Amino acid sequence: MLIDANVALGPWPFAPLPERTAPQLVAYLKSHGVNRALVSHLGAIFLPEPMPANRALFAAVRRTPTLLPVPVINPALATWREHLAACIAAAPIRAVKIIPAYHNYSLRLPALAPFVAAVNAAGLRLIVATRLEDERHRYHALAVKGLPVAQLAAFLARFPATHFVCSGLYKPEIETLAATHENFSADIAFAEWLNTLALLTQKIPARRLLLGTNTPLFDTRAQVDKLRLARLPAKTLALIGSANAARLFGL
Amino acid sequence: MRIIDAHTHPVFMHDGATPAAARRLVAHGRAHGIVKMVALGDVLVHGRLPSAAQCRRINDETAQLKRWHPDYFIGFCCLNPTLGARAVEREVERCVTQHGFRGIKLEISNNARDACMGAVMAAARRWNLIVLQHTWSQTNIHQRRFHSDPADTAWLARRHPDVSVIMAHLTGCGYRGVLEAKGLPNLFVDTSGAFPEAEILDFAVQELGAERILYGSDLPIRETSVTVGRVLGAHLTAAQRHLILHDNAAKLFRL
């Protein structure tokens, strides 16, 4: 039983990746031992406003209850309150995601204070996506960089009472943030070194790590094997593989 | 499943140079089905331009690993080609005759097109060595003065068709890099480099054939379960997987 906290549907314009329907994605993830997944729509990254992609996401997963929709909200847009309300009304959601680097705002954005408050008031978890790909390999005409870890640290300090989920952090970034902040959990999609999880869990409690594969951009088998073959106690693997996600997202 | 890892750094920034660490790494490898590792040396410990003495120290560490585990590690000789032909020839001869190294590892001292590579390729030809060239797409890195783009490594292989060249880091080379490697039977690509980006290995097999691809992990920078998993996760036949994970390297390294 695995829960994947970092999966997407929809097209990625920069590589010939498979574009799966929701039922196909369910079957594909199941073939790799993933029973439930938090899923966003890649279209939300590139459209001028993310709601068409969020609507496509809700429609796609309506009949696949093991895919839990995570709409993307852009709090730099004047209409973020309407967007958040529309997402809450559209489907039972557990979390919303922001992607500051792709949506051209920093975590110092003033609107983030009311936005975080609104997300908390709605009982939702906020996922901060720090990167989607290795910046060295991005499409040459894009200038998107990963979210600076110092900016994320300041953001975590600004909202000490809120526990965030950060996706896309490199292993050293998780370790740096974990040394000073307790109000975040991180997925392991971009954390890698020899014996990744054994090393990471020396720096951050296992209860704050989540399986995240970054499917379809990354190879799902490889990402799942990072957890499945880690030489850690079964209880620790269960925390990272599913229990933490279940707790954080109320599943 | 028997695997040969064509791209490892068992000693990395001084870590891993003890008998206990080497034993742990061999046990780790064997637990993942890896029957042999190509040890490329602690290639960046002295920066991108190691002196002759520093190259010797790096290679002596690799030789020590070989002595501890002679059936497990295959040594490659770390060089700084900009030190000149005499230094290159001397160090290659020492590594081959005294330590039985099978190849040459080139990092980012210079670009693969630079004139100083002539002595390296001559030494490789003389001693029948494989040349593994660190390669990464320079589209977004902009270090081409000393950092080889796939086009540069392909140029090197094209210019020296009698020397087998490994273009390291499939993922770092990207789709453009795979296309650069087409039509060059002496040029191989290893699967190491960066995160397990989906589909690129499938693309490489489609464009180059499985016979031109070698499994490489780049450990300890990468996780073994991930680097093996990306091969197992690609849409390959069992025969193609076997070639990539083992047979191509066994043939190339004459094992």
Image (cartoon, coloured by chain):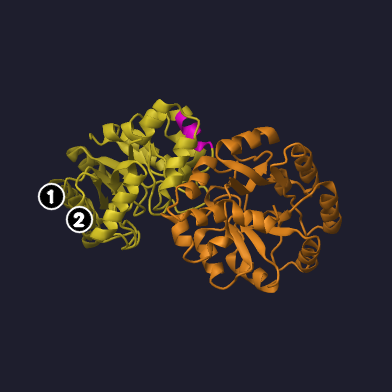
Chain colours: A orange, B yellow
For image coordinates 60% across by 70% down, the residue present is A182
Q: Does the magenta stretch include residue B207?
A: no
Task: Give the image location of residue A169, x and y in percent.
Answer: 57, 58
The residue at 37%/31% (across/down) is B242
The kind of residue on which mark 2 rests is Gln
Q: For residue A139, which quarter of the picture? A: top right
Which residue is tagged 2?
A: B64
Residue indicated by mark 1? B98
Figure check: A205 above or below B135:
below
Quadrant (top left/top right/bottom left/bottom right) for the N terminus of chain A: top right
Bounds of the magenta span?
A: B199-205
The numbered mark at residue A137 is none
Q: How many labels does the image show?
A: 2
Chain letter belonging to callout 2:
B
Observer-nearest residue: A219 or B30? B30
Q: Image height check: is B203 above or below A71?
A: above
Residue B203: within the magenta?
A: yes
Give x and y (percent) for residue A13. Answer: 65, 40
Tell me the distance, in whole angstroms, between the alpha carbons under discs 1 and 2. Answer: 12 Å
Q: What's under tag 1, amino acid-wise?
A: Gln
Q: Which secondary structure type mostly characterizes the magenta part of the structure?
A: helix
Q: Quadrant of residue B44?
A: bottom left
Q: Label 2 crowding class (10 Å Cα cut-off): few <14, some 14-19, many 20+?
A: some
